């Protein structure tokens, strides 16, 4: 079942909160994972794997490097959904 | 006309003893943070490492191997001449040939034992244990010396931000021999060569030779690819090794993963969901990542700190460049 962009954002914010403790209202589309949210590449990978499971999508390792902001991740996940 | 003879060996095997040798120098995070434009705090947070052991110029992988092996042989209570094979898992041989194992066999008094090196990166020791188990049960030898020995600092570029700060120097040795009960469970091992580029050297020997600046090849990795594979794929391998062993998670005394990175160990432990009673080896904190040496070093330390663990079951799993992996449940010596 495809999620709306808002649902993807909310779901992603939950995953980020689980992994890092960052509060969900801090997770907004324009935020950069590294510069604004201070999420390191290892935590990023954990979030990516959990997102694959949650949204039933595949996010290859090559793609992860391109997902620098929350908005880019939400777009990618939304389009990757069947 | 008579047929060909078939060798047969002991029905069961176990690890009789372990020996350990760590690099002679303590290298703190502050010592190496400068060239990677980092800090003690960043390194601790990212890797769990407080300090690592490295060898000075006086000490090479063969010397570390010899120290660790001498301890293991002495503790096993056998003569070195009883060793039928010397297997050294290493990526630290500074020459293509001859093997470190041949030199080690000579140094410890095991000549004319068969001697060869295994190139299986951080899975090397588990590959060596699998081979020792098979060699003994097939009647090829009675005792096997399996060593993981590395001087990774020889291959660490101080400015490399992908892996250099993790690396340490050390050797761990195991004497494997016959047993009256199963001491080494079935090995689950394998490879994924599609990820051959995920971790390895930054250039070939030939490129280095032709380089006017004369820089030796050094280690590098694609950390995110390795992390994802190490945690999620290796958790499946660990489960398979546990199932194959017939031992339930609650019956394990210890979990001894390759000491790649504390974040990997933590995430691994979470994925596998072991009860709190299972000791988890975290030697990386003060030793660093010593590739093929990391599992025997971590197990040796665990037994020094918790001698009552002896005789219990440990799940060991190695994984690294190749990508390759190996796991088995063993009885702690």
Image: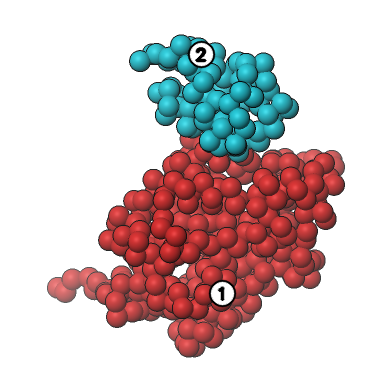
Chain colours: A cyan, B red
Q: Quadrant of residue B132?
A: bottom left
> x%, y% of residue B135?
37, 69
In the rendered structure, the answer to whether residue B235 lies left or right of residue B49 reads: left
> x%, y% of residue B215?
79, 45
Residue at far left of view: B1
Question: Residue drawn at (27%, 61%), measured in percent from left and top?
Answer: B246
Q: Is residue B148 above or below residue B37?
A: below
In the foreground, B171 or A46:
A46
Question: Residue drawn at (85%, 42%), measured in percent from left and top?
Answer: B213
Return the residue at label 1.
Answer: B305
Q: Secondary structure at mark 2?
A: helix
Q: Is residue B98 above or below residue A81?
A: below
> x%, y% of residue B148?
56, 64
Q: Quadrant of the C terminus of chain B?
A: bottom left
Return the residue at label 2.
Answer: A6
Chain ID of residue with mark 2: A
């Amino acid at each position: 079942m495809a999620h709306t962009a808002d649902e993807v954002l909310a779901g992603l914010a939950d995953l980020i909160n689980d992994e890092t403790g960052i509060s969900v209202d801090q997770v907004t589309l324009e935020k950069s994972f590294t510069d604004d949210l201070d999420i390191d590449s290892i935590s990023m990978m954990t979030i990516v794997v959990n997102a694959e499971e949650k949204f039933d999508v595949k996010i290859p390792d090559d793609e992860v490097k391109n997902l620098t902001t929350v908005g880019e991740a939400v777009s990618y996940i939304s389009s990757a959904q069947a | 006309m008579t047929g060909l003879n078939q060798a047969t060996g002991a029905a069961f095997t176990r690890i009789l003893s372990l020996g350990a040798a760590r690099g002679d120098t303590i290298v703190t995070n502050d010592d190496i943070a400068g060239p990677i434009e980092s800090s003690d705090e960043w390194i601790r947070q990212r890797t769990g490492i407080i300090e690592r052991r490295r060898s000075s110029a006086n000490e090479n992988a063969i010397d570390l191997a010899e120290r660790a092996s001498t301890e293991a042989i002495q503790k096993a209570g056998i003569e070195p001449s009883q060793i039928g094979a010397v297997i050294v898992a290493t990526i630290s041989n500074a020459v293509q040939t001859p093997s470190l194992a041949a030199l080690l066999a000579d140094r410890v008094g095991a000549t004319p034992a068969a001697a060869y090196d295994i190139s299986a990166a951080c899975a090397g020791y588990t590959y060596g244990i699998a081979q020792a188990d098979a060699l003994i049960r097939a009647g090829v030898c009675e005792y096997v010396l399996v060593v993981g020995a590395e001087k990774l600092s020889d291959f660490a570029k101080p400015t490399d931000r992908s892996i250099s700060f993790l690396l340490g120097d050390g050797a761990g040795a195991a004497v494997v021999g016959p047993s009256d009960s199963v001491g080494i469970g079935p090995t689950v091992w394998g490879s994924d060569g599609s990820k051959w580029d995920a971790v390895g050297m930054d250039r070939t020997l030939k490129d280095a030779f032709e380089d006017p600046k004369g820089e030796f090849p050094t280690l590098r990795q694609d950390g995110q690819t390795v992390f994802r594979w190490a945690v999620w794929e290796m958790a499946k391998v660990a489960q398979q090794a546990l199932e194959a062993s017939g031992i339930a998670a609650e019956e394990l005394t210890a979990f001894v993963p390759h000491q790649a990175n504390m974040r990997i160990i933590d995430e691994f432990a979470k994925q596998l969901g072991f009860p709190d009673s299972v000791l988890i080896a975290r030697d990386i904190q003060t030793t660093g990542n010593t590739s093929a040496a990391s599992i025997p070093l971590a197990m040796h330390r665990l037994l020094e700190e918790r001698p009552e663990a002896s005789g219990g079951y440990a799940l060991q799993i190695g994984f690294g460049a190749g990508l390759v992996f190996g796991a088995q449940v063993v009885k702690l010596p």
